[in-house]
Each structure stands twice: as structure tokens, then as C-alpha cells.
Image (tube, rainbow, N blue to C red):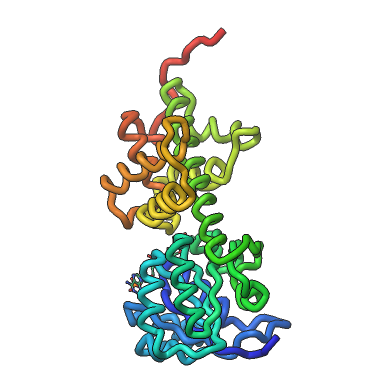
């Protein structure tokens, strides 16, 4: 393995910010990265990143090509393809491209083919763990592509929780899309259950106390519902429009057709309705507000005084 390579990070949003900071941090026993260049569409963010983490803010995308490794973390594969296109003339054979966007497999495969013709290897490397996980370097990475071994030392800087090689190029995107379907489906199911219990007269906090020590628990019941919904913060840090993009990727890209039985297309409808209502940038946990509105209940203010049905 070569040591001390120059890495360019493109996209310093909720996730890219922490990913770039961990690539820049001098970690004991790790000598993979010599310098981190950062480029962001809104330049003030890259300047702030440089001032905070000792990275180097570059003016233009062409400047960002002066590196051995490019790391992108952008909203969708469309922006990644556009950046690859723009960078194309400045790229050099032998470079490596690690795309941390939660993308769609087909567009990713096309971008990888384009880069391959320029002599640049690409892996898709979507991540899970949220903005806090990105800042701590404690992400899970789902990687697709033949250059996995080459990319792994760099991915290790920000994905200390788990790195899984899922298969060929685009396989990481496919797994990530399925993962996020499960994430938001668990959230919607959890909220539906709590709303039904609220109508029955059991407070959400009380119900979660029991459920979280039982077989129905999930990350959403254990963490997201109490921390973001019952608290009324709705501020996990993941935009609802981006979650909708992942669910659409799964439905279209993985062929999860609406056969009238599958649950995920139903969840997509609810997410679409909520995105129309609250906007693309609303936190994805806001989807619960749409369910609350329909039920005419607020999960945290509900006091557990509803009429209890006698099941005996
Ligand atoms: P953000 O919206 O916070 O950040 C998006 C970044 O992309 C910003 O740096 C933004 O620049 C830049 N950008 C947007 N459009 C363009 C464009 N046309 N050209 C160049 N740069 C552009 O998104 P996240 O960081 O939350 O998400 C990034 C990816 O990571 C997405 O695919 C998302 O699904 C995924 N993800 C997000 C998680 C989360 O919890 N937030 C968790 C795991 C994965 P600017 O600052 O100028 O707006």
C-alpha cells in the first residue's frame, strides 16, 4: 500500500463534513492520508472546514482534481455524474474515486465506466450512521466495486463501525437503498403502533418502555422516536427528500413493484405525502407528523387518558 496520499473531498454537507474531518485527522498507526483538500459548492463551508480541521479549501473543482483520491458525498448520483464530467479533463490515470453518496446503482455504473475510460477506479461507498456518526468516524460503509481493497484504508478513516464489500460497482448503493427502506418503514410502523396505543389510552413513553424491552423494538423505537419525535426536535439531520430518493431507488432500481401486497410502496406514498407537506429539507423523522395529523393526535402531548378497550 502506498502511504501519505492526497485526498480531495467534494461535498461538505451533513455527512461529507465529518467524513472529510476524519480523513484529515492524524490517527495513531495510520499513515494513509498526507493532506485533505476540500471543495464545496458554497465556499464558506470549505473555508470553515479548513479553519476547523486543518484541511485545505480549494477554489475550483479543477483544483480538487490535484489529488490521488477523490471522495464525493453529494445528494444523488446525478450530482456525482455532473462533477465527474466537469472534473474529467483534469483527472489522471491511477486515481481512485470513492463515492459516499447514497446513489442509484445504474447511474453509478455509468459514472464508473466513464471514469474507467480515464484510468480512474471507482467504488460506491454509501454510509450509515448519520451526521454524528460521520463526525465520530463511526460509520458503516457498504462498498461496491473491484477496487475495494485499494479503497479500504481510506474508508477505514471514517467507517470504524463496519465496512462490508457488497459486490460489484453499484452493490453498495443497492444495499443502502434497501437499508433505508427498512429504516423509514420501521419508523412509520413504530409511529402507527404508538398512535393506535395512544387512542387506546397508553402514553407513547410508557409503550416504548415496554416495547424496547421486547421483541418489537428497533433503532427507531429505541432511539429515533424518543429522541426526535417525543422530544419534538425532529432534527436527526437527514433530509426527508433524500430519504424519499433512497426509497425510490429501491422501488425502481431493485424492482420492488407495487403488487398491492408489498409494504414498501405504501411507506413511499406516506413519505411522498409528507415531503409534499413539509418540504424536501424537513428532517425525515417529520414523516411522523403526517401520521399524527391524520390521527388527530400529538404523540408527546397525549396524556394517556383515552378510553381503554376491554380485550378480555
Ligand atoms: P446535505 O444536503 O447536508 O449536503 C449535500 C452536499 O452536496 C452539500 O455539500 C451541498 O453543497 C452539495 N451539493 C448539493 N447539490 C450540489 C450540486 N449540484 N453540485 C455540487 N454540490 C452540491 O446532504 P447529506 O450530507 O445529508 O447527504 C449526502 C449524501 O449522504 C446523500 O446521498 C444522503 O442520502 C446520504 N446520507 C445522509 C445521511 C444523513 O443522516 N444526513 C446518512 C447517510 C447517508 P452546499 O453546501 O452548497 O449546499
The quarter of the picture where residue 230 lies is top left
Q: Is residue 214 left or right of residue 170?
A: right
Q: Is residue 228 above or below residue 121?
A: above
Residue at left offset 54%, top offset 51%: 179
Q: How many marks?
A: 0
Residue at left offset 55%, top offset 59%: 129
Residue 177 image point, x, y percent: 49, 53
The quarter of the picture where residue 257 lies is top left
Q: Is residue 115 left or right of residue 156?
A: left
Q: Is residue 214 visible?
A: yes
Asked whether 97 or 280 is in front, the reply is: 97
The quarter of the rendered structure image containing the C terminus is top right
Residue 69 image point, x, y percent: 54, 83
Residue 245 image point, x, y percent: 39, 54
Asked whether 287 or 307 is in front, the reply is: 287
Q: Residue furthest top?
A: 312
Residue at left offset 48%, top offset 81%: 117
Q: Residue furthest right?
A: 29
Residue 90 image point, x, y percent: 42, 90
Q: Is residue 3 left or right of residue 301?
A: right
Asked whether 134 or 168 is in front, the reply is: 168
Asked whether 76 or 31 is in front, the reply is: 76
The quarter of the rendered structure image containing the N terminus is bottom right
Give ligand 1's quarter of the image: bottom left
Q: Is residue 156 visible?
A: no
Q: Is residue 192 above or below residue 250?
A: above
Amino acid at each position: 500500500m502506498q502511504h501519505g496520499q492526497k485526498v480531495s473531498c467534494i461535498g461538505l454537507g451533513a455527512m461529507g463534513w465529518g467524513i472529510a474531518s476524519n480523513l484529515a485527522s492524524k490517527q495513531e498507526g495510520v499513515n494513509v492520508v498526507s493532506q485533505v483538500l476540500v471543495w464545496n459548492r458554497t465556499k464558506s463551508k470549505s473555508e470553515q472546514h479548513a479553519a476547523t480541521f486543518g484541511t485545505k479549501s480549494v477554489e475550483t473543482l479543477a483544483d480538487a482534481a490535484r489529488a490521488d483520491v477523490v471522495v464525493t458525498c453529494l445528494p444523488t448520483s446525478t450530482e456525482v455524474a455532473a462533477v465527474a464530467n466537469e472534473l474529467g479533463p483534469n483527472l489522471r490515470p491511477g486515481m481512485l474515486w470513492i463515492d459516499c453518496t447514497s446513489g442509484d446503482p445504474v447511474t453509478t455504473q455509468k459514472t464508473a465506466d466513464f471514469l474507467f475510460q480515464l484510468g480512474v477506479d471507482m467504488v460506491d461507498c454509501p454510509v450509515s450512521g448519520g451526521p454524528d456518526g460521520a463526525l465520530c468516524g463511526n460509520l458503516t460503509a457498504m462498498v461496491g466495486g473491484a477496487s475495494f481493497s485499494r479503497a479500504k484504508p481510506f474508508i477505514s478513516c471514517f467507517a470504524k463501525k463496519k465496512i462490508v464489500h457488497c459486490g460489484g460497482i453499484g452493490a453498495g448503493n443497492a444495499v443502502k437503498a434497501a437499508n433505508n427502506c427498512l429504516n423509514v418503514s420501521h419508523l412509520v410502523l413504530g409511529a402507527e403502533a404508538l398512535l393506535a396505543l395512544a387512542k387506546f389510552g397508553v402514553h407513547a413513553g410508557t409503550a416504548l418502555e415496554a416495547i424496547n424491552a421486547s421483541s418489537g423494538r428497533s433503532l427507531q423505537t429505541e432511539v429515533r422516536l424518543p429522541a426526535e419525535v417525543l422530544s419534538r426536535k425532529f432534527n436527526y439531520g437527514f433530509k426527508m427528500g433524500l430519504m424519499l430518493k433512497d426509497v425510490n431507488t429501491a422501488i425502481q432500481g431493485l424492482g420492488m413493484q407495487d403488487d398491492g401486497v408489498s409494504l414498501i410502496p405504501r411507506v413511499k406514498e406516506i413519505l411522498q405525502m409528507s415531503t409534499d407537506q413539509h418540504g424536501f429539507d424537513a428532517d425525515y423523522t417529520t414523516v411522523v407528523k403526517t401520521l399524527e395529523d391524520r390521527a388527530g393526535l400529538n404523540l408527546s402531548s397525549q396524556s394517556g387518558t383515552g378510553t381503554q378497550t376491554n380485550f378480555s
